[in-house]
Amino acid sequence: MIAANSYAKVSIKQLSSGLTLDVNGWNSNAGAEVILWDFGAGGSQSNQVWTLHPNGVITSTMNGFALTAAGTAVHSFDNALTMQPDTADALQTWVLQGHTLKLRDYDLCLDSPNNSTAKLTKLQA
């Protein structure tokens, strides 16, 4: 597990909509989907605040799970999920290029299907 400390804590917003990356339904279990939602809707935002670690892993402040691209290098990537952090997992290692979060070892970025700007959109890589 990655220890929480003074690394940057941020909300991550979609530029085109202003909606924020959100752990859907405050689900604190591994495998929770990451969606777009209004920032601060429903009170506390711990399910919308993320910790950026120097190794490229991004964890939810709500449960410490890492932003993960579901899938494998051989298959297409599906929804973005939160999973137990693993610093050796290339599906959890992100880099910021301009305004885009990209998987460090793949030519894929965090994306909304069909450029959706709607609430509840499930994000994917």
Image: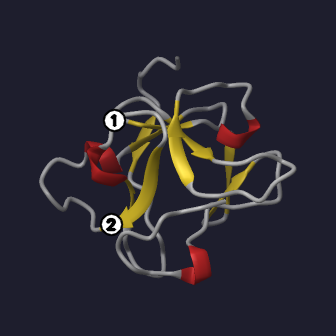
Q: Residue at x 52, y 20 (%)?
A: 2
Residue count near mark 2 (Cα–Cα under 10 Å), binned few <14, some 14–19, many ≥20: many
Disc 1: which residue: 28
Q: Which mark is residue 51?
A: none
Q: Which image quarter holds the C terminus?
A: bottom right
How is the protein colored in the picture? Answer: secondary structure
Q: Residue at x 60, y 43 (%)?
A: 68
Disc 2 or 1, which lies upstream in sequence?
Answer: 1
Q: Residue at x 12, y 53 (%)?
A: 43
Label 1: which secondary element: loop
Q: Nearer the viewer, residue 124 or 100?
A: 124
Is 69 above or below relative to 17?
above
Disc 2: which residue: 37
Residue 55 position by quadrant:
top right
Label 2: which secondary element: strand
Residue count near mark 1 (Cα–Cα under 10 Å), binned few <14, some 14–19, many ≥20: some
Q: Residue at x 42, y 29 (%)?
A: 64
Q: Position of residue 5 (x, y in %)?
A: 41, 22
Is 80 above or below relative to 56?
below
| Outermost residue to the left | 43
CA separation, marks 2 and 1? Answer: 17 Å
Q: Position of residue 7 (x, y in %)?
A: 47, 31
| Outermost residue to the front | 75
Q: Position of residue 102 (x, y in %)?
A: 70, 56
Is 47 above or below relative to 111?
above
Question: Residue type at mark 1?
Answer: Ser
